């Protein structure tokens, strides 16, 4: 091999995009084989992501020019379609690869009806391809397109079991998504009208603060907040989860909302950065505190396993909002936030998959009546507990390191003289306690005295994948250095 | 990886590995589970012994793994960590034998022994932690690993105790977490150093350091059951006897006390602690806890509950000794870490034997038990007298040094507390002893164990009796042989010599 890693990188990026699109298209035109395409494809995709990240790190780029930009079809910006890879997108691509692989393997066992398979796999592969595109897109219009691909396949996946509850949940989700997308699109149009470019890097270079930019920022952020289920725009989340199949819930809470959050972060670190003021930061932070309290309270009250997990997502995303005021004091704090989002996604996907296994075995997810199944399925409950520990932010897990770094950032704001930092610190620390409360609710019935009944048989995939993913979420505690290093390779970000 | 770090990692893995394997064992694999349990415990004993000899020879062991930039995971072996590590390795082995006998035939043993091993891994991790962050990691892991043991029986009372335990420990864990992150921001992620590493911060950040000290004491004080943070402990005794023994003698309360020792000796340092008036405050809290625990113990008829309140009281001797912050006091406190461990585990084993064999849970039911179970009663008597502090038993060595330490540190009133506490100890420990030997039995015994495993030649199952006698012998020897080299007292004196840099210091 005479090529250097840096020289091979553009090829690898195009290759990943091509692979994910090819899998989605193949599964669509060949639905009978879709589950095989999906199963082998998932392994292939994970391998491709690993290769890409190895190349990216081996290229050893300097933080200022770490971004690799590829013009598809040879058309350069501002006209053409630009792919854009840097430390931030690389990190989330790896996350998507890990969760995507786990979900695919789980689905091999979960979706076994031949007709359901033909519907599930093409949709899921489109969703995955959309996520990859989203993370690799360098311009606002492409981002919009991939966001739509992600949203529409997610809606279809929520509805795909065809039950009345599923369809109504999906309809609500669809409306929210359309609203969010339109809002985002209008922002894109405003920016295009003002500047005549869509490329984020070019936009960043040109933006001066005017009413158009403000308007665009509000529209795009609100649209994305809807899609990310960020408080107070989260109302669609729990109903959509209640009816969705387990792998869909895992992807929805683990990846889809994280993808929307990624976009918010990208925009506010890029073109909209000059718009952020301390007052704005504090407002967002307060929303985060409210999300944390409200989401946890709902999770502590709910009697259904899946809705506890869904509300936990609302609560945990509160941390991401609290991070905004922290970033205004310590601009490097965004890396901590991304690390938190990554370990949250891993743990949350694992919890949802474990909950799916238990629900399948019990035939329902009413926590009060699941005791016998929980007692008999120690392995799955162990996975639930281990991933739950990561959500609580206790050692040795990734959640602990993320919580440590968040707490450090919060305490730094106090030391920097900002009194409201006390509130952030209390929220960050106390949130773990609330999480402990609802995780305990899910796990405790397994320790009650009473009959044991393994319930309906589950496939080995459904038995082992949640545990495997929980172990990955826990082991992420040892990936802190690597992740933070990768994230520093993001140009333009402090 | 630094030199010799693998040995520390091996010690950690010797219980973690078998523990994780046990989780996946089917319930009926009795033989393999026992092999894993005893194999792990035995391996650890050998490895810790090796470490002990090497450290004595002057070898240094250290393992540093970066978690994120600026935060290292550090394992290190100093004299203090070895004191705790050895205690936990020896008592774990004994408790494992006891637990295998105790739980024979009961359901869910794989889960039990899995968490049991995790619990001990966390304890030895605490012992070997080289800095506050590592200590915090294992400390929280201990919380998580203990909860399933507390609720093991699955009864509503057990689950309630478990909830209370988590409420206390997780909340205090968060306070501790916040304090440690804050301290790290202020002073850096330093490793433990005898005499502390805060240096000039004591003058520049006086108030902050005081606040942080209080937060750290709340964090560690809950597990150490300092009044008023102790309420979870007497309720957690619904757990099976081996768990109570582990909780009270080795793992949980000791982890709290050990954390306090580390903070006072190796983070703040005695000088800073005295200078800021923190040591004096801690002395007062410890004294209150010592008296309060004893008074509560006197008021209850439930044997395990009396032992639990006695733990509240006795663990504070450790805190008291360290808070006195002079060489003699520290010797008294640290040696009690060992002495309280072996004595209290003896008493809990005895309580377990009484309950399992004859269904005795209350002191008022102990009448005449000495004739039915003379060996267990003998062990109980040794433990009780040791706790009271009668020479030449282990407890006496402790109290003697604590008294000297109080005089040295000019806390004369502490002597009165020690005397009062000894009298109270006698008041609540002598009645069960007297009833056991001299009481008159009127109703027949409920022979529990005999129903389960058929008549045995011994007074109870040998796996319950042998460990009990072994630890009873230890608590006798700890006092009798206190003057020998490598006795707990000798080892503690070595620690203090190194900490206070007084070569050849002899009390």
Image (spheres, coloured by chain):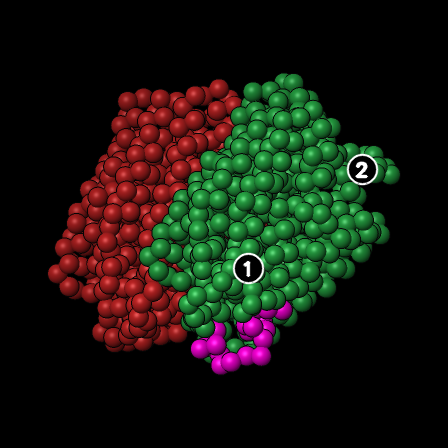
The chain letter under disc 2 is B
Toward the viewer: A198 or B166? B166
Q: Name the residue nearer the viewer: B285 or A407.
A: B285
Q: Nearer the viewer, residue A136 or A10?
A: A136
Location of residue A65 in the rendering, given as x and y in whole percent from the top left corner: 55, 39
The residue at the point 39 percent across, 47 percent down is: B164
Q: Which span is picked out in magenta?
A: B449-466
Number of numbered callouts drawn? 2
Report which residue position mark 2 lands on: B507
Judge whether residue B383 can be spotted in this image: yes
Residue shown at 62% from the left, 46% from the top: B388
Q: Secondary structure at mark 2?
A: loop
Q: Which numbered disc covers residue B479? A: none
The stretch drawn in magenta includes residue A358: no
Reply yes or no: does residue B455 show up in magenta: yes
- Relative placement, left or right, of B23 versus B3 is left
Residue A7 in view (yes/no): no
Counting residues from the start of the chain, the first of labels 1 and 2 encountered is 1
Please state if A346 lies on the left or on the right of B98 as rendered. left
Residue furthest toward the bottom?
B454
Q: Is residue A309 above or below residue A163?
A: above
Residue B298 image offset from top left, x and y in percent:
48, 44
Disc 2 residue crowd, few under 14, some 14–19, many 20+, Cα 10 Å: few
Residue at (39, 51) in percent of width and height: B161
Colour-to-chain, red: A
Q: What shade has chain B been given?
A: green
Residue A252 picture location, percent across and down: 31, 53
Q: Which residue is mark 1?
A: B438
């Amino acid at each position: 091999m005479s090529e250097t890693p840096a020289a091979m990188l553009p090829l690898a990026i195009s290759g990943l995009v091509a692979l994910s699109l090819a899998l989605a298209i193949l599964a669509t035109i060949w639905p009978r084989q879709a589950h095989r395409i999906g199963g082998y494809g998932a392994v292939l995709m994970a391998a491709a992501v690993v290769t890409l990240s190895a190349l990216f790190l081996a290229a050893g780029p300097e933080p200022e020019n770490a971004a690799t930009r590829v013009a598809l079809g040879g058309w350069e910006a501002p006209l053409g379609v630009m792919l854009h890879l840097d430390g931030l997108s690389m990190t989330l691509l790896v996350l998507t690869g890990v969760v995507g692989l786990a979900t695919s393997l789980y689905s091999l066992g979960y979706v076994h009806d031949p007709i359901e398979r033909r519907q599930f796999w093409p949709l899921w592969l489109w969703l995955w391809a959309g996520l990859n595109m989203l993370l690799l897109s360098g311009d606002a219009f492409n981002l919009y397109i991939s966001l739509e691909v992600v949203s529409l396949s997610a809606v279809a996946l929520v509805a795909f079991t065809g039950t009345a509850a599923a369809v109504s949940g999906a309809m609500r989700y669809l409306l929210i998504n359309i609203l969010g997308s339109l809002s985002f699109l209008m922002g894109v149009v405003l920016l295009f009208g003002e500047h005549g470019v869509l490329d984020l890097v070019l936009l960043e270079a040109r933006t001066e603060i005017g009413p158009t930019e403000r308007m665009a920022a509000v529209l795009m952020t609100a649209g994305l907040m809807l899609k990310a289920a960020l408080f107070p725009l989260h109302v669609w989340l729990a109903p959509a989860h209640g009816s969705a199949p387990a792998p869909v819930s895992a992807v929805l809470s683990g990846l889809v909302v994280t993808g929307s959050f990624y976009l918010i972060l990208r925009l506010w670190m890029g073109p909209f950065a000059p718009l952020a003021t301390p007052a704005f930061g504090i407002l967002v932070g307060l929303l985060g505190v409210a999300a944390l309290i409200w989401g946890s309270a709902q999770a502590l009250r709910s009697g259904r396993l899946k809705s506890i997990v869904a509300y936990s997502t609302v609560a945990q995303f509160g941390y991401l909002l609290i991070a905004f005021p922290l970033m205004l004091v310590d601009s490097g704090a965004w890396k901590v936030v991304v690390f938190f989002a990554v370990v949250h996604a891993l743990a949350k996907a694992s919890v949802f998959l474990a909950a799916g296994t238990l629900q399948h075995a019990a035939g329902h997810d009413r926590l009060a009546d699941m005791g016998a199944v929980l007692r008999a399925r120690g392995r799955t409950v162990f996975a639930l507990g281990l991933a739950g520990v990561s959500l609580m932010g206790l050692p040795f897990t990734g959640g602990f390191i993320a919580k440590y770094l968040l707490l450090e950032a919060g305490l730094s704001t106090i030391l920097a003289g900002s009194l409201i930092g006390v509130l952030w610190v209390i929220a960050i620390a106390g949130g773990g306690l609330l999480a402990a409360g609802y995780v305990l609710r899910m796990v405790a019935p397994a320790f009650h005295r009473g009959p044991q009944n393994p319930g309906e048989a589950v496939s080995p995939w459904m038995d082992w994948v949640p545990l495997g993913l929980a172990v990955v979420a826990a082991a992420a505690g040892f990936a802190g250095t690597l992740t933070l290093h990768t994230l520093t390779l993001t140009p333009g970000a402090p | 990886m630094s030199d010799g770090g693998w040995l520390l990692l091996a010690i950690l893995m010797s219980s973690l590995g078998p523990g994780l394997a046990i989780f996946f064992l089917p319930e009926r694999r009795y033989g393999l589970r026992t092999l894993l349990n005893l194999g792990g415990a035995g391996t650890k004993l050998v490895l810790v012994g090796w470490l002990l000899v090497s450290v004595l020879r002057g070898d240094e062991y250290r393992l540093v793994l970066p978690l994120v930039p600026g935060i290292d995971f550090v394992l290190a072996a100093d004299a203090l960590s070895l004191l705790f590590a050895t205690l936990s390795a020896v008592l774990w082995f004994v408790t494992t034998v006891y637990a295998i006998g105790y739980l024979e035939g009961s359901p869910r043993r794989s889960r039990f022994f899995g968490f049991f091993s995790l619990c001990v891994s966390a304890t030895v991790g605490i012992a070997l932690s080289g800095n506050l962050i590592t200590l915090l990691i294992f400390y929280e892991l201990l919380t998580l690993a203990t909860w399933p043991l507390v609720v093991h029986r699955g009864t509503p009372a057990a689950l309630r105790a478990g909830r209370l335990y988590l409420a206390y420990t997780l909340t205090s864990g968060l306070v501790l977490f916040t304090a440690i992150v804050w301290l790290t921001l202020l002073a850096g992620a330093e490793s433990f150093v005898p005499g502390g590493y805060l240096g000039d911060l004591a003058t520049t950040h006086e108030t902050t350091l005081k606040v942080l000290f209080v937060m750290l004491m709340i964090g560690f004080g809950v597990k150490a059951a300092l009044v008023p943070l102790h309420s979870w402990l007497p309720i957690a005794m619904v757990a099976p006897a081996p768990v109570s023994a582990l909780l009270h003698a080795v793992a949980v309360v000791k982890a709290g006390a050990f954390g306090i020792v580390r903070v006072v000796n190796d983070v703040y340092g005695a000088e800073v602690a005295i200078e800021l008036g923190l040591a004096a405050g801690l002395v007062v809290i410890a004294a209150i806890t010592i008296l309060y625990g004893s008074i509560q113990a006197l008021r209850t008829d439930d044997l395990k509950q009396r032992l639990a309140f006695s733990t509240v009281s006795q663990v504070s001797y450790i805190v008291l000794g360290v808070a006195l912050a002079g060489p003699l006091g520290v010797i008294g406190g640290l040696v009690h870490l060992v002495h309280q461990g072996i004595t209290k585990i003896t008493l809990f084993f005895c309580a377990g034997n009484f309950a399992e064999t004859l269904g005795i849970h209350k002191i008022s039911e102990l009448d005449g038990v000495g004739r039915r179970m003379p060996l267990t009663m003998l062990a109980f008597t040794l433990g009780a007298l040791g706790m009271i502090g009668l020479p030449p038993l282990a407890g006496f060595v402790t109290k003697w040094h604590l008294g000297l330490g109080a005089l040295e540190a000019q806390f004369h009133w502490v002597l009165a507390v020690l005397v009062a506490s000894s009298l109270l100890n006698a008041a609540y420990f002598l009645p069960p002893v007297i009833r056991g030997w001299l009481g008159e039995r009127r109703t027949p015994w409920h022979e529990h164990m005999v129903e389960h495993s058929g008549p045995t030649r011994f007074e109870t199952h040998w796996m319950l009796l042998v460990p009990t006698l072994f630890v009873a012998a230890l608590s006798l020897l700890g006092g009798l042989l206190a003057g020998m080299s490598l006795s707990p007292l000798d080892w503690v004196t070595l620690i203090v010599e190194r900490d206070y840099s007084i070569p050849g210091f002899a009390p």
